[in-house]
Amino acid sequence: MSRFRLSRTLRPLAAGAAVFSLAWQLSGCAMPGSLPAPLALLPAAAAGLAADGATPFPDDHWWQALGDPALDALVSQALAGQPSLAAAAARLDRANAAADATRAAQGPQAGLGLDLTRQRFTEHGLYPPVLAGGSYNSGNLQASGSIELDFFGRHDAALQAAIGQQQAAGAELQAARVLLAANVARGYVALARLNSLDSLARRTLAQRQAVLALTRERVQAGLDSVVELRQAEGALPEARGQIEALAGQMALARHQLAVLSGQAPQALDSLVPALGSLAALALPERLGADLLGRRADVVAARWRVEAAAQDVALARSQFYPDINLVGFIGLNALGLDRLFTLGSRNFGAGPALRLPLFDGGRLRANLRGRAAEADAAVAAYNGAVLDAAREVLDAGATLRSLARQQVEQAQAQATAESAYDLAVQRHRAGLGSLLVVLATETGVLAQRNLAAELKSRQLDTQVALMRALGGGWQDLPAPDSPAALTSAPRRAS
């Protein structure tokens, strides 16, 4: 008798093993096939910069290097109250939730259910006469659980893909912060430039008014003609028009800067920044490509590549069987008075297997689509690296050119200032006319205007370079990032 019972117990297990073996052999019916070779990530050297690690890493508060407390306050307010950052933070929260949900699905699942029912059983159905035509209470109290055995890496691929999307969303939030801070800094520099030009334009207007007054005196004295008078009069509307144009540009710049910093458009109507309060930084001798790996949008693109590669692995794992272990235990009875009796116990356990055999090519098409998305992610990453390298090199070349221009302009301004000082001294000594002094001052004002333009361009390009490097080049520990800049994406073979 015991041998008979043992045989009856082992028979279902043997049958299950046979079914599993058959399913394993049939798994060849739905095969992934071969895929084209994946695109390769762009090597760091191909970006055109030396990856020597000689330059320090970016700073989280890189804009403070400009040395203007008013700018620091504006950037801090923008980072705290700009709606675009709130949207990026919400996308990060969504990615975090998706990663948590994927992680939770990997563990054991359990549930508890309770059903209480009063039912009248039909007299003309399948129920025996004892039940037919009667109304009875029934109850079911059951706990169930299951766990999926991840033999083929499906859960791990899904989790790694979700983590890749999570990390990409975090990097995109940082990229949005850097871009917002750069836009605020560049807007502040632009407003400082306009304010400087406005001061020079007002000085130019005063100078032309003095020329007009002197010309009138000379006309009355018979030293000049009406032609010179009309020329002096015509210069005034031009100067006043320039002042009005600058006032309009400053109003627009203040409105834009206020909105960027998360304030009402009119909140900064009294802001008058000065170029002199902003410091120019020394350009590093070499700009290593290692800094491109610190740029948040490049890091985000790299995480997208990692996530897409894991999606390919996940799509490939769909060709293999799902193997689950399920079990339940509970109480089930017809009649609530017997629900908690020993005879109402109900339990069971066993494996469950699902295997695709013929699907009309659906899984294979899904795999090809995921592989194409991975190639697109690699192409986007390569494009981001090239664009970042171009922006860095463009900004560096522009800054070096501006530095050379500033040297020449400083010499020209020094010469103009010296000529103006000599003209003033000669006039005070009675050796020169006031008209010569005013004419000489025109060259000085032109050089000061050019100096303001060059410095504002230098500051603006400097901010652009700091943004292109992910936020300056000060030394801070590197954030977590996927594999090295030159590593290739993983794709299941």
Image (spheres, helix red, strand yellow):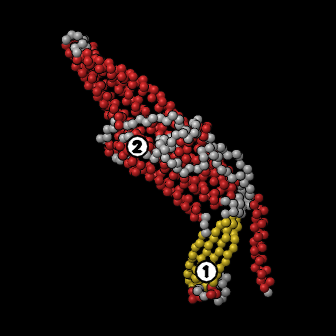
Closer to the chain start, of discs 2 and 1, is 2
Q: Which residue is drawn at 50% across and 40% down?
A: 468
> Where does residue 279 sit, x and y in percent of width and height?
39, 36
Label 1 residue SS = strand
Residue 153 in the image: x percent, y percent?
A: 67, 59
Report which residue position mark 1 lands on.
Answer: 330
Q: Position of residue 127 (x, y in %)?
A: 66, 84
Name which residue lies at 69% across and 71% down.
Answer: 351
26 relative to 163 in the view: left or right = right
Measured from the top left, where is residue 352 in percent x and y?
A: 69, 69
Q: What element carries label 2?
A: helix
- Residue at horizontal 44 percent and vertical 49 percent from the top: 84
- The answer to whether residue 135 of the structure is visible from this angle is no
Compare residues 287 and 166 and report the one nearer the observer.
287
Residue neighbourhood size for the residue with mark 1, other residues' Cα within 10 Å, grouped as few (<14), some (14–19), many (≥20)? some
Quadrant housing residue 163:
bottom right
Vertical comparison of 306 with 328: above or below: above
Q: Mark 2 points at which residue?
A: 64
Q: In this view, does 273 lie to the left or right of 129?
A: left
